[in-house]
Amino acid sequence: MRLNTERKEEPLFIKVHEKDNVAIVVNAGGLKEGTTFSNGLVLTSRVPEGHKVALKEIAEKDEIIRYGEVIGKALKPIKKGSWVEESMVELPIPPDLHKLSIATRVPDALPPLEGYTFRGFRNPDGSVGIKNVLGISTSVQCVVGVLDFAVKRIKNELLPNYPNVDDVVAINHQYGCGVAIQAPEAIIPIRTLQNLAKHPNFGGEALIIGLGCEKLSPLMLAPDGKDRDILSLQEQAGFSDMVTNIMNMAEEKLEKLNLRKREICSVSDLVVGLQCGGSDAFSGVTANPAVGYAADLLVRAGATVMFSEVTEVRDAVNLLTPRCETKEIGNALIKEMQWYDEYLQKGKADRSANPSPGNKKGGLSNIVEKSLGSIVKSGSSAISGVLAPGEKATQKGLLYAATPASDFVCGTLQLASGMHLQVFTTGRGTPYGLAMAPVIKVSTRNALAEQWNDLIDVNAGTIATGESTIEDVGWEIFHHIIEVASGERKTWADQWGLHNDLALFNPAPIT
């Protein structure tokens, strides 16, 4: 599909749906008052890049429509050709979770996409990794200083001797003690840590470093439930003994990991996470639709695809529940929305807390507009499953994995769900990356791709200027995923070693 835009050298705007009464300005730097489009529309005020212009007169209390959906009502009359600023848009109420249609418009399965493979590491349990990494997990934050010291020495002194091992990653966190591990919601951080230690990129060879007196027993995190891969620091003779023993255990694991070899694997073995950060008004018309097209290609090839971020789905969930394969799946999706509604209410959080200031600067007026653009990442496939936060993905197809919208928390939870790599769209720009899995960064606009030419992996901005189609960029992302999964190509984040800290989601009490 090619979006309907004006010619590149002329003033450009994008109208997404025939019902829309606003459009966004494409031109870098925005357009000045008096600018005339080829269809005769004249700007009555300056409109920044990505911000909305009124395509017709909008009376006070009239609906403002983008993506063919109501994003709010006008708080005052808006003239045709004027800038539709955030302050002019009244935030509408969210969809009523008790009145949603479920499994009423389940998409037909798209034709299978066969024959696509990548070169991955087959694990003893049948899973596949796309990196060969030594993972060292902690059971409590108290041991992080010692482990970080040891990891530096492992990387400098041991890793060069094992050329087939890509990296050594410490799974550090702030959990483990001073926490109510018996509280119902403690299951979220605990299963997250358990599943992180079992990540397929670790090849079943993760180590667990504990202190010895923490509430969260290291044995609870051991991938096979045995203590042979656990080191308790309180049982060591001192700091030097701690570091030496960590290094000795690490070298045993490095010897095993070094024997792993890449082999031909089906794309159906992949688990791909989708996320957006630093979103703007272009996200829903360039990068996210292209990622959605790539998501459909992956589902057609038999892979697992996860989209997330509850607060950036909640206000458009009425467009998702009809796509659920069954009523059970639809009810599971609603359950996650309801849980998060109650979680936010406890903290007295206001829906206006999202979008961020940067999102608004990029043209997004409110969470409804942001959500409508965000869910486009899910493509057009039927939703075949729902995961609670940190739950392991065990099925194929398009899954909704419930997470907060925070980049770092969402990334951590998707890793726990088994994500091999992440496709991350951005309009404002972020150097975000993950040590455990590659992050493919997709730009929503040309200006960002040009500014950050050594941080953006794929540019979807050419869709806005008519140089590429959504399908063109979707296929580019699909092939990029295969090349990265095969180790044939590095993401910019991996090339520069840009890796953010893991961030657990812990809604349970801290004692």
Image (cartoon, rainbow, N blue to C red):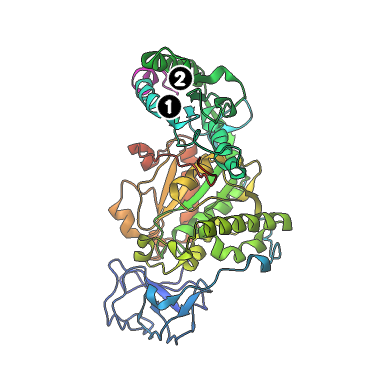
Image: 73 above or below 159: below
Q: Judge left or right: residue 348 versus residue 147.
A: right
Q: Where does label 2 land, which residue?
A: 233
Q: Based on the displayed image, in which of its 4 quarters is residue 460 positioned?
A: bottom left
Check disc 2 and report its element: helix, strand or loop: helix
- Please state the horizontal and vertical placement of residue 230, each as a whole percent of the image: 53, 20
Q: Where does label 1 land, which residue?
A: 143
Q: Who is closer to the viewer here, 302 or 509?
A: 509
Image: 2 above or below 44: above
- Extreme right residue here? 327
Q: Judge left or right: residue 68 versus residue 142.
A: right
**Dot 1 surroundings within 10 Å: few (below 14), some, or many (20 or more)?**
some
Q: Based on the displayed image, in which of its 4 quarters is residue 187 positioned?
A: top right
Q: Who is closer to the viewer here, 220 or 270?
A: 220
- Please state the horizontal and vertical placement of residue 497, each as a whole percent of the image: 35, 36
- Please state the horizontal and vertical placement of residue 110, each as a whole percent of the image: 65, 55
**Dot 2 surroundings within 10 Å: few (below 14), some, or many (20 or more)?**
many
- The stretch drawn in magenta includes residue 415: no
Check disc 1 and report its element: helix, strand or loop: helix
Stretch in magenta:
155-167
Q: Judge left or right: residue 215 versus residue 352.
A: right
For the residues labelled 2 and 1, say whether their Cβ atoms are less than 8 Å apart: yes
Image: 40 above or below 496: below
Q: Judge left or right: residue 501 versus residue 313.
A: left
* Residue displayed at 44% across by 24% down: 165
